[in-house]
Image: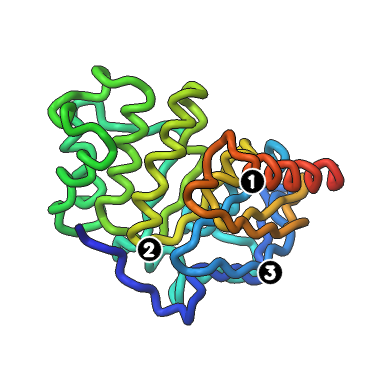
């Protein structure tokens, strides 16, 4: 299977320097400065409406900052997106209803203008091998989200941005997806940034949690998540302890 092309980063995949963003008179993001390491997963958590998704959209090049700079490696986000080095997955899988699973997953490679030779392998890896010919209406919510994650990975992106990707599925399915899907991007060395409202999910999935203040978003805590793979279950003591640390930080900043 194809692997992401390494960014020329010197170890840093994403750099945000004094990034600000407002919508009219509403300040959304206030002077965010952070460097995210290549090949690692970083989670953004904070109060609802604090600017998490706005930060993700600026990293994706979908929104331009009012001031400051964002670099993915040595390039601006739109340049990385144009060469197919960036992919994004949303809470809504947004699969094309007239395409079956195989064609929906292949779309990720088509849009990135890259070979689609990993389509069937990824479909198997996300547990949809028996459903490659099914259309979205024939799939459960969790299955549609699996297909969307496969679509985002099929182009072997250097950077994967995840905006509440598991927020629309039931708790049992969410827990299963949390366990099964992250190894797909971790094992390929992809740099991932995750937005989630679930503190426990942030701890389970990430190597680092950035806690944001209420709007306008500022980074108020930076918590390293150093867990072995067998400690990354929702019911482990290590995850519960780290999640409590993050909760405590959120409460202190309210």
Q: Which mark is residue 18?
A: 3
The residue shown at (57%, 39%) is: 201
Q: Secondary structure at mark 2?
A: loop
Q: Position of residue 186 (x, y in %)?
A: 40, 56
Decide which of 171, 64 is in the foreground and name it: 171
Earlier residue among tags 3 and 2: 3
Q: Quadrant of the N terminus?
A: bottom left
Quarter of the picture containing the C terminus is top right
Q: Nearer the viewer, mark 1 or mark 2?
A: 1
What is the crowding at mark 2: few (fewer than 14 residues within 10 Å), some, or many (at least 20)? many
Q: Tell me, yes or no, if residue 239 can be seen here.
A: yes
The residue that appears at 49% across and 47% down in the rendered structure is 230
Q: Position of residue 40 (x, y in %)?
A: 49, 62
Q: Secondary structure at mark 3?
A: strand
Per the model, the C-alpha gap separating discs 1 and 2 is: 24 Å
Marks 3 and 2, Cα distance to the nearest angstrom?
27 Å
Say which label, 3 or 1, has the lower sequence index: 3
Q: Is residue 119 above or below residue 189?
A: above
Pointer 1 residue: 238
- Vertical side of 64 occupied by 18: above or below: below
Q: Which residue is mark 2?
A: 189
Mark 3: give few (<14), some (14-19) or many (20+) Cα within 10 Å.
Answer: some
Residue 146, quarter of picture: top left
Q: Are marks 3 and 1 in contact (CB under 8 Å)?
A: no
């Amino acid at each position: 299977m194809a692997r992401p092309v390494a960014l020329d980063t010197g170890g840093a995949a994403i750099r945000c320097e004094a990034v600000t963003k407002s919508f009219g008179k509403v300040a959304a993001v206030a002077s965010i400065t952070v460097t995210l390491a290549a090949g690692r997963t970083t989670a953004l958590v904070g109060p609802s409406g604090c600017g998490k998704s706005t930060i993700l959209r600026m990293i994706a090049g979908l929104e331009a900052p009012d001031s400051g700079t964002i670099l993915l490696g040595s390039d601006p986000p739109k340049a990385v997106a144009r060469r197919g080095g960036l992919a994004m997955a949303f809470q809504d899988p947004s699969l094309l209803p007239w395409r079956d699973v195989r064609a929906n997953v292949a779309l990720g490679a088509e849009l990135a203008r890259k070979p689609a030779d990993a389509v069937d392998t990824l479909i198997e890896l996300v547990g949809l091998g028996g459903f490659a010919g099914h259309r979205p209406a024939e799939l459960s919510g969790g299955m549609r989200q699996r297909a969307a994650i496969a679509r985002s990975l099929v182009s072997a992106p250097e950077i994967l941005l995840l905006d509440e990707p598991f927020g629309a599925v039931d708790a049992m399915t969410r827990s299963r997806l949390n366990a099964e899907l992250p190894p797909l991007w971790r094992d390929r060395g992809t740099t991932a940034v995750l937005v989630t409202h679930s503190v426990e999910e942030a701890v389970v999935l990430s190597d680092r949690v950035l806690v944001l203040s209420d709007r306008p978003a500022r980074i108020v805590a930076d918590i390293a998540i150093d867990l072995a793979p067998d400690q990354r279950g929702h019911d482990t003591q290590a995850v519960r302890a780290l999640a409590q640390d993050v909760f405590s930080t959120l409460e202190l900043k309210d």
